[in-house]
């Protein structure tokens, strides 16, 4: 982010650097960058922005769910199960907030601005969340790219946040920004602390009081919380962590989660006293950090893969983790609405009732 080469910078922004910057500079020189696209007007919500404390926002977000992530073909005009009525369905079941994982990088133009057509799709989701009374976290989810190439990520990520924060500057307080999902790999704590400070600075130019979500490195691991250093004077930060422990249970058979988890089969979680005590001890660690650092907490992802895990075990784990979050006043967002971690069967268009009931007890069928 800091100290970049001036060539190719979008007007008034830190300069582009790395391969992306060189490519962007060439494209600008050729006069081809986005010339035909009219800029999108800023998002105009139904409700004006009124600042709320991050503590009040966490209380309001309460029981959330990850939905319509960048993986979904809906974003690129492909065949998708997603229906606008899904937000109403989520709300009616008792969920109070949503987290939308964005793959913005694929929609970043060569001039350092996001594609207005993609932004229009995002606007439609934000408007839908607003219409359904759901708080919405815009989560930048290009974490794997960033973990591999920090030079390129620094450029694109800062341009993403310039654009998103400018565009949503008037959006209601129900809209939050999450700077980057699960920083890991080449992003170590010291680099991340410096990036997080820079990115918060970018957002604050246009959104002085909007609540921003930011988590530690190591895939938003609770063990990395002590290494997270945030601007001390910023009063609008929510700190996030993810919980998938034990991984051999939640990710048994998952090809993307390393050989040990990929090979795991038949791993049970039956809620023994030791298992439950481990969850509570982990959540106590987070609560102690939150108290000492005066930051409210969002458990931004937790969930289990359905390939080999038993439904009874997955339900009990989900309920235990959700209750551990609730008992400590953390907001939470289940991973994920549909698909292999899902609480909703999109083919049959019906809830997977035991998991839904673990997340939102008392939900209507
Ligand atoms: C990743 C998903 C993955 C999930 C559970 C998320 O952060 O984006 O691809 O399925 O974590 O591993």
Image (cartoon, grey):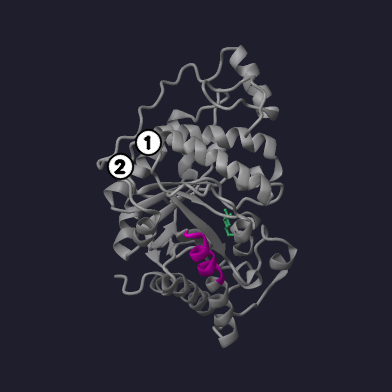
For the point 41% across and 68% down, the residue is: 329
Q: Residue at x 51, y 27 (%)?
A: 113
Stretch in magenta: 285-294
Whether residue 310 is visible, yes or no, is no
Residue 200 visible at all: yes
> CB atoms at circles 1 and 2 under 8 Å apart?
yes
Of the 4 image quadrants, the one containing the C terminus is: bottom left
Q: Residue furthest bottom?
A: 273
In what element is the residue under mark 1?
loop
The quadrant in which the N terminus is found is top right
- Give the overall secondary structure of the magenta segment: helix
Q: Is mark 1 within 8 Å of ligand 1?
A: no
- In the shown orientation, is residue 145 left or right of residue 172? right
Quarter residue 263 falls in: bottom right
7 or 306, which is in the foreground? 7
Q: Which residue is mark 2?
A: 49
Per the image, is 293 magenta?
yes
- Residue at 54%, 83% (x, y): give it: 271
Label drawn at residue 169: 1
Q: Position of residue 94 (x, y in %)?
A: 32, 65
Q: Position of residue 303 (x, y in %)?
A: 52, 66
């Amino acid at each position: 982010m800091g100290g970049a080469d001036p060539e190719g910078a979008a007007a008034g922004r830190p300069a582009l650097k790395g391969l992306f910057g060189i490519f962007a500079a060439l494209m600008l020189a050729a006069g081809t960058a986005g010339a035909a696209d009219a800029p999108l007007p800023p998002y105009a919500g139904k409700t004006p922005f009124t600042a709320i404390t991050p503590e009040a926002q966490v209380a309001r977000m309460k029981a959330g769910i990850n939905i319509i992530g960048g993986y979904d073909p809906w974003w690129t005009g492909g065949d998708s199960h997603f229906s606008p009525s899904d937000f109403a369905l989520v709300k009616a079941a008792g969920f109070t907030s949503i987290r939308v994982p964005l793959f913005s990088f694929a929609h970043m133009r060569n001039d350092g601005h996001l594609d207005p057509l993609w932004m229009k799709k995002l606007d439609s989701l934000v408007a839908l969340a607003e219409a359904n009374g759901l708080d919405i976290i815009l989560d930048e989810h290009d974490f794997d790219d960033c973990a591999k190439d920090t030079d390129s990520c620094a450029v694109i990520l800062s341009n993403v946040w310039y654009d998103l924060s400018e565009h949503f500057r008037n959006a209601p307080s129900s809209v939050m920004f999450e700077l980057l999902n699960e920083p890991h790999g080449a992003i170590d704590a010291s680099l991340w602390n410096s990036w997080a400070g820079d990115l918060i600075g970018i957002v604050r130019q246009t959104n002085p009081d909007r609540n921003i979500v930011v988590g530690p490195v190591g895939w938003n691991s609770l063990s990395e919380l002590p290494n997270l250093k945030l601007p001390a004077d910023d009063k609008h930060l929510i700190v996030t962590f993810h919980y998938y422990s034990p991984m051999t249970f939640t990710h048994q058979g998952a090809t993307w989660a390393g050989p040990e988890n990929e090979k795991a089969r038949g791993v049970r979680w039956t809620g023994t006293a030791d298992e439950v005590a481990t969850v509570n001890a982990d959540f106590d660690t987070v609560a102690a950090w939150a108290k000492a650092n005066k930051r409210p907490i969002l458990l931004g992802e937790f969930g289990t893969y359905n390939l080999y895990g038993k439904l009874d075990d997955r339900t009990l784990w989900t309920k235990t983790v959700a209750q551990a979050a609730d008992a400590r006043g953390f907001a939470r967002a289940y991973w994920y609405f549909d698909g292999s971690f899902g609480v909703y069967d999109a083919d049959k268009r019906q809830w997977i009732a035991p998991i839904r009931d673990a997340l939102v007890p008392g939900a209507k069928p």
